[in-house]
Image: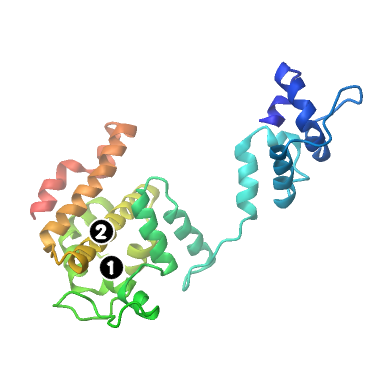
Amino acid sequence: MCVNLSKKESLTWVCGEICWGSVLRRYGLCTVGLRKPVCFEAPWFYVRAGRCIRRNGLESVSPEFWYESKRVLSLLDAKEEMEGVDGLTFDESKIVWKNVCNKELTNRQKDLAWMCVKSCLPTRVFQRRRSFINNDKCPRETCGGTEHIPHIFWECGYAKEVKSCLKNLIKGLTDIECLKYEMVMFGLCGLNHDKARVLWFLVNCVKETLWDSRNLYVFKKCEINVNDCTGLVWARLFLYVISDKRKLGYDAEGIWKTKKWKSWFLS
């Protein structure tokens, strides 16, 4: 904002120049005349701005870049180091973190996706390693496997049944015959943008519902059958349909094909 104001001699700039002129002129972001008063001990918030410029190595950025905040943010993003995901290449890790930070996901689904990638979801294996519990077996009586992240969302018989009930929906929206582990956990699918976006929403709705049903079973002793769990997935996915209809209007039907949902659900 200060740099934008420096483009013209407005009253706001003349008043503010006294305070922030000594900070911004060090980086060539403004020109302070010797005949104008300048505060050499700038207020703390302008000092913080100068410190931020130094810490992020933005001293050499030209004033033209500062006129557009998005260009400055792009420079900061380029300086950030990306943490790799175990078992994935650099390019695949980049896609995964982009998927996890998708602004269209609900906050809870973003948190769940982040915890899955970071392997910090509080499963029984996670808790046993920290001596919170003594048993790391899946709480479902018909399963008995070791409860880690891949088990909850991929290996458990309950999860397999839920995904089997959704196969018509998955195939109808994305043309995928069979889900793969990388699709469910990371959103790596090789589809075009629209179908990859729909698939990522879908698998996050599935993971959120499976995690909720697991917690209800563990803490409330309330077991949700497969059909009810599947219905919750459809309901949560429909929230994204509503959002797209508000933004795209009738074009959203070409993406979501809601007129066919009833036949997919009953078949």
Q: Quadrant of the C terminus?
A: bottom left
Q: Are marks 1 and 2 in contact (CB under 8 Å)?
A: yes
Q: Which quarter of the picture shows residue 180?
A: bottom left
**Residue 4: where, in percent of width, then height?**
69, 28
Who is closer to the viewer here, 145 or 252? Answer: 145
Query: Residue 158, can we see it?
Result: yes
Q: Which mark is residue 153?
A: 1
Q: Which residue is mark 2?
A: 206
Q: Residues within 10 Å of mark 2 (few under 14, many from 20)?
A: many
- In the image, residue 4 sits, relative to residue 49, either above or below, namely above
Residue depicted at x 81% and y 37%: 41
Q: Residue at x 63, y 49 (%)?
A: 76
Label 2 amino acid? Val
Towards the viewer: 148 or 197: 148
Residue that lies at the very extreme toward the bottom in this rendered image: 134
Secondary structure of residue under mark 1 = helix
Q: Residues within 10 Å of mark 1 (few under 14, many from 20)?
A: many
Q: Earlier in the sequence, mark 1 or mark 2?
A: 1
Name the mark on residue 8.
Answer: none
Q: Residue 55: x and y, percent?
A: 72, 52
Q: Is residue 228 above or below residue 237?
A: below
Q: Give the amino acid at mark 1.
A: Phe
Which image quarter is the N terminus in?
top right
Q: Is residue 7 visible?
A: no
In space, the residues marked 1 and 2 are separated at their CA atoms by 8 Å
Residue 130 position within the rendered picture, expressed as x and y whole percent measured from the top left: 40, 78
Q: Position of residue 86 (x, y in %)?
A: 47, 72
Residue positioned 78% across, 34% down in the render: 29
